[in-house]
Image: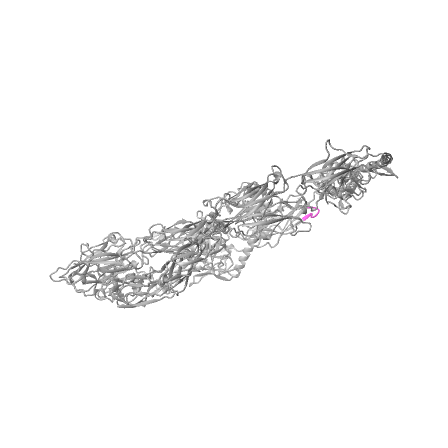
Amino acid sequence: MRLMKGKVYFLSESGERRVRLRLRLRLGWCVVIVVLLTCMEMTLANRPPQFVLNEGQSEIVLRLKEGKETSIGTLVHRLKGFDSDEDPLIFGLRGQAANDLLRIENLGSNEGNVYLKKELDRETEDSYTLILTLTDGHLGEGSFVTQSLLILVEDVNDNAPICRTDNSTVKVEENSDVPLILTTIECEDLDEGPYGQVIYKLQTDPGDEEVFSIQQTKDGKGLLKLLQPLDYDKKFLYQLRVIATDRANTGQVNTATHPILVEVVDREDRPPEWLVVPSVTRISEDVPKGTHVLQVRAIDGDRGVNNKISYSLLNENDLFGVDSESGIVFTKGTLDREDDRNGGSFILQLQATEKTNSKDKSLSISTEVTVLLLDVNDETPRFASRSYVAEVVENQPVDVPVTFLGDSIAECFDHDLGLNGTFRLYTEGDGGVFEITPSQGINQVTFLVRVKNPSRLDYERLKVINFTLVAEEVGIEKKKSKVGMTVFLRDANDNSPQFEKEIYKVNISENALPGTTMIQIRAHDDDSGLLGTEGIRYTSITGSIADELILNPITGVITVGSTNKKSLDRELSPAYFLNVEARDNGGRGNRNTVQIQLLINDLNDEKPNFLLSRYEGRIFENEFQFISPLIVEAKDKDLPNTKNSEIHYSIVSGNEEGHFQIDEITGKLSIKKTLDFESLPVIPGHPESNVKKLNLTIRANDMGSAPLFSLAAVTVWVLDQNDFSPEFKKKYYHKIIREDTPQGTEILTIQAEDLDASLPFNRIFYRMENGAGDKFMVDSESGVIRLSPGATLDFNLHSSHVLQINAIDGGGLKSKIPTVVNITVLDTNNKPPSFIVNTADGIYHAKIKENSPRGTYITQFRASDPDQKPILRYRLDLNKSEGRSPEGRLVKGLQLNTLFTLDSSDAILRVGGGQLDRETVEFIRLTIEVEDKGTENGKQMATAQIQIQIIDEQDNEPIFRRSIYSTSLVENSKIGTVVLTLVADDADLDTHIRYALLPLASDPHRTEFPLVIDSDSGVITVSQPNKIDRETRQWINFTVLAEDSGNGRTTKGIGRAEVFVRILDQNDNSPLFIPGQDRIEVREDTKVGSVIGSVEARDLDEGPNGKVSYVLDRNSAMGKFSIDPESGRIRVAGLLDREETPTHSLVIEAWDNWYGYSSPDSRSSFKNVLVILLDVNDEKPVFEGLEEEFVVTEFHEGVIGTIRAKDGDAPDLPNSWIQFKIRGGNELGLFKLEQGKNQAKLFPARSLKGFYGNYTLSVEASDGGKPINVVSRDFQVHITDFNDNAPRFITLQNLTVAIPENATVGSSVIQIRAIDSDTGPNGVVRYRFRKDLASNLDTFTIHPTTGLITLTKPLDRQKVKLYHVRVEAYDLGQIPLSSDLTFKVKVENMKEFQPVFIVSSISINFTENTEEERVELPEAVGSDNDEDEEEPDICYFILSDDQNSTEIFYLDPYEHWISPKIILDREQTPSYEIKVLATTDCKGSQLIAQIRSTLAVTIMVNDLNDNSPKFEKRVFSGGISTSSSFGSIIVDLSAADSDAPNTSNSQLTYYIIPPIRTSLTEGLGHLSENQNLFLIDGKSLLLNFDPQINMKGYFKFEVGVKDGDSLMDTAVVLIYLLREDQKVKIVVRRNPVEVRENVDKFLRTLSNITGARVNSDMSSFQFHENMDGSVDKTKTDFFVHFVHPENNIVLEVEQVLKLIDLNIEELDEIFKEFNVIDTQGSTLTPRRSKGLSGEGRNLFLVYAGGTAIFLALLLLVVISLSCAQRSKYQRRLKAATATAYGSSSTILPRSGTVPNTNIHSSEGSNPIWMQAYHNNWYKEDTHSLRYPLSQPLSSFCI
């Protein structure tokens, strides 16, 4: 510190040092002068100096290591000299080389340091001889004392071996003798000793370690040897790497890599290999000569030689040849698939021979190919015969074959293959009577012509049928051939009796007497004799009154028997339907029936009957129209539209006042004089009912000659109208209340009265009209006036309130004059105080200096209170007070209670005990409260705020804005470069700051410090650029001082800041790769973007200069790889394919300062990375050749064929090893595969016998990789049939055939049939006789194709009575197989000929559940016997069948009657079909096969009424509402009777079984006793009354059903009264008729899933109506409602919809089936009566409006009550006991003890906090609609 001119300067420590240095320099100059004078004197006697050496040392020798071991600037030696004159010595170097290498720094007077100036390199210079100089300065110019210096450079291991590159590729022949020296490797290392000695190691690919080796020689070379023979086919290229390393034992070991490529030279030692061999080739049989069939290709097995290949055909023939150069196989001749010599296929043996000079005989290879000839459609289907003749009996059933006559051969053939040889057989011109079977054949087929439409086989209309047989190919050309066929019909008895009329109509009087003739019926029959008209008998008459009629069986006359009145009662039945049966053959033959319609003539014997026992009508008083028209109706069962049924009506009693009149024709009641409700008598027990009644008696009489009548009761319900308005009892009310009256307090009650006699018209509601504002409310029912919830009274605003209140009755009429209520308000003391503030912003303001002492006055507050005697007290509200810093920030943790005090009485604010600091808080805002302690109720308070400003004082030191500064500076920056600007702040105002650097202890004079600071601005700049070197120092750290002016204080404030300056680098280093990662192995399926490896290079620089970016050479990457420029990660950039390129050599560059391109300052280095692709299983196997087809016989046992495939993956890995298996087509297990190398042979897995046909085998080829690659291909295997099945006869063995002796030549004896299980020619059957010496078979001949045996010459029973015939059936196989059939032909004279039935079929009847019933069968006809022979007995037998008829029926063989063995049941089996054989063999031991001896018997089972009808459901249910019309259908009843349909046994009648009970009902009145509420029309249950709005509950009764014999069943019916809004509308996309027919299924499914009873509105099925009123006929609307099945309560719509939603997944299927579009609540409105007049409608609107007003008033009352405090706590208490409802799968109503608490809640909510309008708890619990979901269905109750 110095004092100059009144100013005080502060010097830093460095400044003081500079002053001291100057003083020392001045003293130093004085010393120098004295010394110089002394030296001058001594020079006059100077002696030379000399070097000081070690003893015995003549030369200075230094041993220095090269390179970085001895870095530049290293002190290598210290020189010493001696001068006896004690002169200062100077050391030096002689020569430029010495000065370039060394630098000498003189120390003191006789020493000097020698420093290395240039880096040493032993390989460049291993020693240096230098001259040192020494002088004392007095030897003269250019004169020195010299000393030699020898520097020996010692070696370090800094050189890597270098190898010669002239032997990088070596070629060696395969199979060369081993061991073999391949080449010599020579590598040189420039280092000495062990560092320069090279050793060799060999690196090979995996698996090649034993193939090569390297041997070290004495002269430092390496011999590469081959240890194992090489095979070109296995591997033709080897990549070797020779690693040359020095012998360094310690430290760094240098390595060099020398790549060697060994190429294997191929030899000619392998035969050719097939590349393309199509094992099966298909060509068309009609190709021309020279056609290219297929091409084979082979290559030299020695790939490195690749000689040319020639081709030849070993089994050359006239049809095929092969081109020797191209391998193309071509046709030489004409091909024919049908030629028997080849069978449509050829096997060609092809040979491939290598063209070579080698003497090896095995340079060829052969293979086989199969050529299949594809069929050409060159054949036309042909029949074996030019025409056909056959016969058939008329009326034969379906599928009966016709019998071919003559030499007709029923065969057809076409020798083409496949579709060309496949043909279909059909008929033309027969009108669909016949069909051919089989309908389709292949190559050759034997066919039958069978009956298809028996209805046209009528001998009476047609005797012969001529038509055409057609054989047509199924292929495209559709070649066909036709032959004619004639079928002769044989007659049979097939006509039934025919009546003259289709229906007979007869009229008869109700009082017809017994014996009266009704009608005579007649029938005729086209057959003759007894089978025709002559044999007709009228066998029976059936019908409901058949027992009371008599039918003459001969004449057909019907007369009345002993009738009773009930049977011929027109009213019971106006008509009867009878059936009369006629049968021919004397009543035993064919039958027919005719219907007789019996009409009963009417008599007046029935009186009119009212439809209802009681009628009801409703009418409003003073009205002339009933609400709904009141019409009484009676019915007379006498004949309609006659006097007997004409009805007239009249009023008999109850109309004494003349109020009513009736239309005598229509029965419509009307009003003649209006009714007065008040004058009518009151209904006992219901004094306030709005309905009164009048009773009338109505008579209905007919107009017959003797009129009959009946009476009915009519009740007229008179409804009250609102014809009186309410009136107040007082016109004016007055009440005085206090200003502080609590909300909800009852003030007074008003009253009014209404003279109407019934509810709701005499029920009064009160409504506030005006004057209440929001202060008062009136109870709508009680008239109580209360103070509204939340309302407060203010005497100062309103001292009184005038209310105007109206009274409204239930009909909506207001009182004519409203009442007035005057409420006077009394004043109370309730005004709060207020502060007196005279500022614009409404707050107080004050200032105070910081550090002010305690008790300093700040300000005083004032407040006022409008009350007369306020007691005001003040206090500070510190919770609402705050302080802010000079910057405006909120100061937290400020202890305001210690800074200020406030007097509670005089409101003076003073400084408290805490210290005020402006730098901490400059503005403080306090909140002051004043409270009136004299208030009566509650607190009365007011608040105000004051803002206090703290005034500043000088009491703070400078503070840097940051305690630590950090910045950067580029090395070698110029002088004056700004480094950083520092700023310090002083919290005090008006102060000046100066800056200075604090000296460092290590550099007190700042000679090494490169920076200076400006004392005023604080700017730091560069002063010594050469001292800023990042490599030497990376940071400059120092301290900066800031000093304020003090402003009068004794000491100045000083602040400190630490500064850290980072030195930034310049780019002076190149990137260097870290050794390693020269080889990367990666799978070839590595995904694009995958990281496969990384390289790393390091740069000693920093930032962009030291940031290394990596670049991959595009040519080496080939688009397959990329490198991350930041991390050096190598990624896959394209799809890799080892099969395409197995290795990649990548060139990678490392750059610094890289920006996508190199800048001039960028530096780089390079690195090679070898990427080897590892094989993965990415190649699928590929089947070789074209699609295979193998043809074998069913007895084949060897190889069927060979399947080959190849895989492109690595051959030495499992990825290319292929396995085969049969994936499909081998379900029978016929085939198996034997695996080979990439091939499989197909063998039979078992015997193929019987499995001939075409098989498509799906063969799967899979490789051995992971995951497995699988391909499949279909191979055709054709197993041809081997003739191993002999024909099998279907004709019985040991059969005896009878033939009459007089049979003509050519007559058919029998047709033999045999079948063969083989196919093709092996399955074609031919017939011939097996002759022997005693057979005499020249009497017969057999057709070889049809097997029909015919007579060739006349028979003579005297010569031969019995022929033994042996027939052989053989096939047409190459080695034919045969079978024999032996039978007998018995020659009978005419007497022994078998009996014949005249008719082929009959029908008989048995009655079910009847015993000992029998029917005689028609007699069989035989020939007359000779006189000398007795006529044989004809016996009948039932032939066995699959119905087990012999166990069900008994047939007497001699008497020819049949009867059941068991009790028949028509419902189980309504009919039977049996065959009866007539024969003379009564023992039945040998049945002779004669078609005409067989009778087809149809047995019909007559029905008895043995089954009761059964309802389909035990409970029927439906619903009715106000929209249901009188007479509408409610429910469709359904029952079934299993007895015979369309008979009286199954004719059902439905009826109601009284009583009709009601449950849970309201508003039914007299209807509850009415038993005629419902009617039944057919199956439909009809509504017989008009439902009203106020009706509730349901009806329960039983219905019955009975058949004609009164067998019956019962069911329960439930009819529900429901509201319109309880219906759910279903919208479906179907028409109404379809929906109506299937709705039962829909309802049943809904019921099963939801658990509820679901009913539909039977009258609601209609087309859908859109929103705009248009009709959509593609959709249907209908309505349903849901009912609880146990408690019979109708569910609400929202519950139904939610129930459907909860079960929507289960309902999805039925909804989709019915195309359900929407489910929604009903939008129907109650049906309005057509007779309602305009006044009635107005009255209805008035009634509805009044109801709405009433509900609105009721809502206001509910809200008021809910706001009351007492009610609120009651509700909460009640809610607190309720449990939160959870979810359930059903929404059926629930019951519980807490009503409606949670009606708006969700699961988990707390109902206690719900608002008042969400709860209706004060209503009665019995009206709650809320039920817990957890309750079962059984808990549902109202």
**Is residue 1023 in view?**
yes
Residue 653 on image: x %, y %: 43, 58
Name the main secondary structure of what is drawn in magenta: loop
Looking at the picture, how far across and down is residue 751, in whole percent?
59, 49
> Which residue occupies the foreground of this view, 723 or 1313?
1313
Report the span colored magenta: 794-800
Direction top: furthest residue = 55
Q: Is residue 1181 above or below residue 487?
A: above
Q: How many marks?
A: 0
In this rendered view, identify the residue nearer to me: 1542 or 1063.
Answer: 1063
Would you place residue 28 above or below residue 1109 in this image?
above
Q: Residue furthest left?
A: 1428
Give the left or right position of residue 1568, taking residue 1502 as reference: right
Q: Quadrant of residue 1637?
A: bottom left
* Residue 753 in view (yes/no): no
Q: Of residues 249 and 941, which is closer to you in this image?
A: 249
On the rendered structure, is 311 left or right of 1375?
Answer: right
Residue 550's quadrant in the figure?
A: bottom left
Residue 1450 picture location, percent across and down: 22, 54
Q: Residue 797 colored magenta? A: yes
Examine the rendered structure and indicate whether residue 19 appears above or below residue 235: above
Q: Quadrant of the N terminus?
A: top right
Residue 1719: x and y in percent read 49, 54
Q: Nearer the viewer, residue 354 or 1831?
A: 354
- In this picture, residue 524 sits left or right of residue 1706: left
- Way the structure is coloured: one colour
Does the segment drawn in magenta span residue 984? Answer: no
